[in-house]
């Protein structure tokens, strides 16, 4: 693997081409040109909120706009409970009831309520499944991993409750135009290397604040060849290096996916050829092997091969980062006719993902069957679950100061429940390999070429 | 809250990359930070996610922050977009966070809520001499902080200064006739 860098940012001029992010912001603010650093009122196409934040958004909305105020557009506020859904915690349950009341009072079109056929699970994956992540649009969500939708060519960012409430009332929000870092992945990647590895390599390169206030625009043949879900994994973790958003020009797979999900017309936008980037990073993936982020930071990245003797007590497969259908198929490739030797928890991100585990086969057997035969504790209750710890009764929550390997996005102190736990972040292949051996293991040991 | 342009008080000193799970652990996201009861509950939980063995941040007698300010290194508030973290600090009595740099969403939430003042130190400012419990004086207009050992220079708020000056996003929108 090789990483090359150039700094090619000069002073901005109005005739200069724009990056993909700049072009979307310009369109959404009715401007012909925008430059990094400008603060503009930007029109919002979609606003999303989930159960930890909707009650706060609703409170601020009512306080500021009035008890009887109506949301700016009931078709464009997407409500997705996902964080603390399957818990007996009274406050967590109350939040779902508040969502229900608000959705009813406001005639919200897209409320994916718990216990109904509409329920989805993790909001970022549910947004995509519901056709709410569309190219060229502005999407805000009250969750930092809202950046996931950048995989669809959407300008998608995480916001707080106050900003969310403001957008809910007005359909717009003041935003600073970010400068863009271009990251070009090229070369031929090994089968064992997954999107998670590609983004962790960038974490190592940029560090946890290396992209603060910046957009990251992904490009290169490796990005073009990724599946829709793998592209979502890439954009999902850009917030872990501080980025405002991550974005890609939709590839054919993405356009095919969108065609089955939405009938709302959209415009595919591309960066101008003479767009200016604050930094360009070229990453040659040839020769890259599986990597892993050590505790307690997502940028603490080394090759899996360097840590192979470290014992692991628990494994976790789930979340917006690592709980999608492709992630489970990858785990199944490793777990086919094998057994896990450590407690291994798996939580499908959404109901659709869970359904896919049953209908998708790997070497003649369903992913569901492969996982359960291997001894994986597979939850049938989609959601965020133990990625962020959650209430005491959360499935897979880390209760002891043990070493855990996980397909999730953050390994901060206490993130998955116990403050003394050591969390290692890795690809679904590497997590499944560790679940089998009980040690951090290079997944190449278990991968054959017959899939 | 109203932000005074000169603030004097004690500091709680932290390192780099203090994430929002350390400021407010995710399990408490079930609390509504925009309700009076929620705010009260969050006030006692500020910095509840600090590692085992960290000096207590909440005073056990008052159940509020034992310090007026947090002083930290780089990338304060990284991780989640949870506004609960900003509200927990503000409700606990913290008036300002002084840091070498801030994570984007945390900074934005400070500005939009007007709950606490995010103060960014000038590049190269050395905070190693500061210890938890020390008294400092922050002068926002003069862009400087007086410590026992001298003066630390701070950076202007930047592009969002108008919103900070108004006291938050809604106040700013009203002042400028946006809503």
Image (cartoon, grey):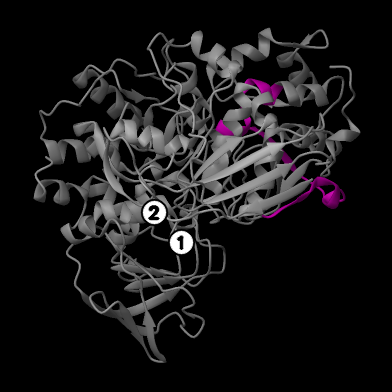
* Numbered disc 1: secondary structure: loop
- Residues drawn in magenta: A300-328
- In the rendered image, is residue A421 in sight? no
Residue A335, placed above or below residue A354? below
Residue at 87% from the left image edge and 34% from the top image edge: A444
Q: Are marks 1 and 2 on the same chain?
A: yes
Residue B2, placed above or below residue A197? below
Sequence-wise, which precedes: disc 1 or disc 2? Answer: 1
Residue at 29% from the left image edge and 48% from the top image edge: A39
- Of residues A332 and A304, the one nearer the viewer is A304
Mark identifier at residue A284:
none
The residue labelled by disc 2 is B106
State if disc 2 and disc 1 touch (CB < 8 Å).
Answer: yes
- Label 1 to label 2: alpha-carbon separation: 8 Å
- Label count reads 2
Residue at 46% from the left image edge and 21% from the top image edge: A268
Residue A364 horizontal side relative to residue B56, left or right:
right
Mark identifier at residue B76:
1
Residue A34, placed above or below residue A307? above
Q: Position of residue A221 (x, y in %)?
A: 69, 30
* Numbered disc 2: secondary structure: helix
Residue at 59% from the left image edge and 51% from the top image edge: A418
| Quadrant where the C terminus of chain A is found in the figure | top right
Q: Chain of mark 1?
A: B
User: Which residue reaches farthest bottom?
Assistant: B149
Residue B28 horizontal side relative to residue A150, left or right:
left
Q: Position of residue A423 (x, y in %)?
A: 67, 49
Residue A240 horizontal side relative to residue A356, left or right:
left
Dot 2 surroundings within 10 Å: few (below 14), some, or many (20 or more)? many
| In magenta segment, residue A312 | yes
Dot 1 surroundings within 10 Å: few (below 14), some, or many (20 or more)? many
């Amino acid at each position: 693997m090789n990483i090359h860098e150039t700094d090619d940012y000069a002073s901005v001029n109005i005739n200069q081409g724009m990056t993909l992010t700049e072009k979307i912001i310009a369109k959404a603010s009715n401007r012909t040109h925008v430059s990094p650093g400008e603060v503009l009122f930007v029109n919002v196409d979609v606003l999303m909120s989930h159960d930890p934040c909707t009650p706060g958004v609703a409170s601020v909305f009512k306080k500021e706009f009035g008890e009887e105020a109506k949301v700016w557009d009931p078709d464009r506020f997407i409500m997705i409970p996902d964080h603390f859904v399957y818990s007996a915690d009274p406050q967590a349950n109350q939040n779902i009831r508040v969502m229900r009341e608000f959705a009813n009072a406001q005639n919200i079109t897209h409320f994916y309520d718990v216990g109904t056929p509409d329920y989805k699970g993790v909001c970022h994956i549910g947004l995509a499944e519901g056709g709410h992540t569309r190219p060229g649009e502005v999407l805000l969500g009250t969750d930092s991993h809202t950046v996931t939708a950048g995989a669809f060519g959407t300008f998608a960012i995480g916001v707080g409750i106050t900003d969310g409430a403001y957008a809910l009332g007005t359909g717009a929000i003041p935003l600073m135009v970010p400068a863009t870092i271009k990251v070009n992945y090229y070369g031929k990647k090994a089968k064992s290397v997954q999107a998670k590895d590609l983004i962790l390599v960038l974490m190592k390169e940029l560090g946890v604040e290396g992209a603060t206030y910046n957009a990251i625009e992904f490009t290169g043949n490796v990005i073009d060849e990724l599946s829709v879900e793998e592209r979502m994994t890439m954009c999902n973790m850009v917030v872990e290096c501080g980025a405002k958003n991550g974005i890609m020009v939709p590839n054919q797979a993405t356009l095919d996916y969108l065609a089955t999900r939405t009938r709302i017309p959209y415009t595919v936008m591309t960066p101008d050829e003479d767009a200016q980037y604050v930094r360009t990073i070229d990453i040659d993936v040839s020769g890259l092997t599986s990597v892993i982020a050590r505790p307690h930071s997502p940028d603490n990245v080394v090759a899996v091969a360097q840590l192979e003797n470290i014992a692991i007590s628990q494994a976790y497969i789930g979340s917006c980062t690592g709980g999608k259908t492709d992630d489970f198929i990858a785990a199944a490739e490793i777990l086919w006719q094998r057994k896990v030797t450590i407690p291994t928890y798996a939580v499908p991100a959404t109901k659709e993902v869970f359904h896919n585990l049953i209908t998708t086969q790997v070497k003649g057997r369903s992913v569901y069957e492969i996982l359960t035969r291997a001894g994986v504790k597979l939850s049938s209750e989609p959601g965020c679950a133990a990625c962020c710890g959650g209430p005491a009764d959360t499935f897979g929550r880390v209760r002891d100061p043990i070493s855990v390997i996980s397909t999730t996005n953050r390994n901060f102190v206490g993130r998955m429940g116990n403050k003394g736990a050591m969390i290692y972040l890795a690809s679904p292949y590497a997590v499944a390999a560790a679940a089998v051996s009980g040690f951090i293991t290079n997944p190449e040991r278990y991968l054959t070429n017959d899939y | 809250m109203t932000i005074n342009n000169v603030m004097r008080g004690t500091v709680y000193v932290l390192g780099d990359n203090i994430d929002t799970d350390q400021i407010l652990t995710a399990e408490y996201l079930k609390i509504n930070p925009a309700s009076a009861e929620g705010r009260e509950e969050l006030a006692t939980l500020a910095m509840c996610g600090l590692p085992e063995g960290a000096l207590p941040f909440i005073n056990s007698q008052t159940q509020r922050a034992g310090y007026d300010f947090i002083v930290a290194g780089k990338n304060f508030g990284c991780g989640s977009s949870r506004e609960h973290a900003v509200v927990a600090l503000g409700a606990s009595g913290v008036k300002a966070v002084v840091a070498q740099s801030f994570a984007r969403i945390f900074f934005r939430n400070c500005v939009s809520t007007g709950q606490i003042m995010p103060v960014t130190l000038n590049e190269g400012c050395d905070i190693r001499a500061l210890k938890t419990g020390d008294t400092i004086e922050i002068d926002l207009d003069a862009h400087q902080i007086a410590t026992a050992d001298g003066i630390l220079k701070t950076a202007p708020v930047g592009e969002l200064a108008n919103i900070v000056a108004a006291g938050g996003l809604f106040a700013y929108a009203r002042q400028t006739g946006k809503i």
